[in-house]
Image: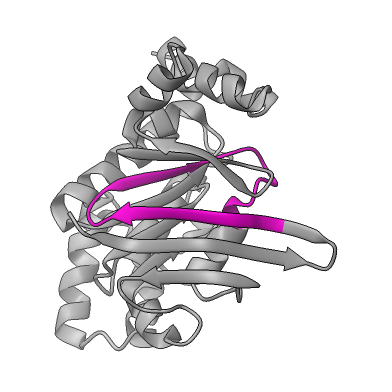
Amino acid sequence: MENIIEVKNLVKDFKDVRAVDNVTFNVRQGEIFAFLGPNGAGKTTTIKMLTTLLRPTSGEIKVNGFNPVTEQDDTRHSFGIVFQDPSLDEDLTAKENMEIHGVMYGVPNKLLNERTRQLLELVELWEKRNTQVKDFSGGMKRRLEIARGLLHHPKIIFLDEPTLGLDPQTRNHIWNYIHDLNEKEGITVFFSTHYMEEAERVADEVAIIDHGKIIIQGTAKELEEKTKTNSLEDAFLALTGKAIREEGKEGWAAKFRGRN
């Protein structure tokens, strides 16, 4: 399977701080790829460089065969993105948010209507299409952002901490939707997280990043075997000498099981 994202010796400096330090990795077409690391590890900075929002200090990037620095428009049409911070217009309805995105990307009206219905049905929001977003729950807003990011039929969707701040049950539902999208749309999913169980449960490939460096990459099972541990969390601890963060120790999957 060919690579849809290629990153080689990527560096990003902010004054005296090196946020991303000589990072190299590849993502295969159609896989679910997890970027796992604590807050401040360089995850969001890397995603911003991949999605044309930041210019690298040095290094090489290819996204769907395009250079995000010199071929920004082609790169942007290749991906959808869900940011950490909400980006919906809450005074508009779900359908209106989808339509504005479609116009921005030049989606023809007939296709726009078809894709809007298809995607809102997929994330179970079609019945709420004429409801203003300000009346949505946090989980509903996240689902709408994911649907919107897929509207122009991108090859890749970037999800930067997509379940941050959501309760365990809603996180579980969000990942069910994303997994279905990966299967039905054939889309490559690149997500960052500091939740161990998310990466272990859904990712085909995991890259652990800390202090701007990728420490190791492989399947969750490979990482556990290399570190002679029994879980991805223990593997991370063995590799970095620390827990990813206190919130991650309890684990959202365990909390979810405890609620049912």
Above or below for 69 versus 233: below
The answer to whether residue 130 is magenta is no
Quarter location, residue 22: bottom right
- Residue farthest toward the right in the current orientation of the protein: 16
Identify the magenta region. Answer: 19-44
Side of 63 where 117 appears, left or right: left
Spot occupied by residue 245 in the image (x, y as percentages of width and height): 67, 28
Residue lying at 46% horizontally and 12% vertically, measured from the top left = 229
Q: Measured from the top left, where is residue 10 in percent x and y?
A: 56, 63
* Residue 89: % across, % down: 52, 70
Res 55 seen here: yes
Q: Quadrant of residue 46?
A: bottom right
Q: How many marks?
A: 0
Which one is in front, 91 or 61? 61
Query: Could you tell me which quadrant the C terminus lies in?
Result: top left
Q: Is residue 124 above or below residue 249?
A: below
Q: Is residue 28 magenta?
A: yes
**Where 48 sits versus 22, above or below?**
below
Q: Is residue 147 left or right of residue 90?
A: left
Q: Is residue 89 visible?
A: no
Please say which color scheme the image uses: one colour
- The quarter in which the N terminus is drawn is bottom left
- Image x and y of residue 199, in percent: 42, 34
In this picture, is 106 found above or below 179?
below
Give the residue at x 34% y 32%. 219
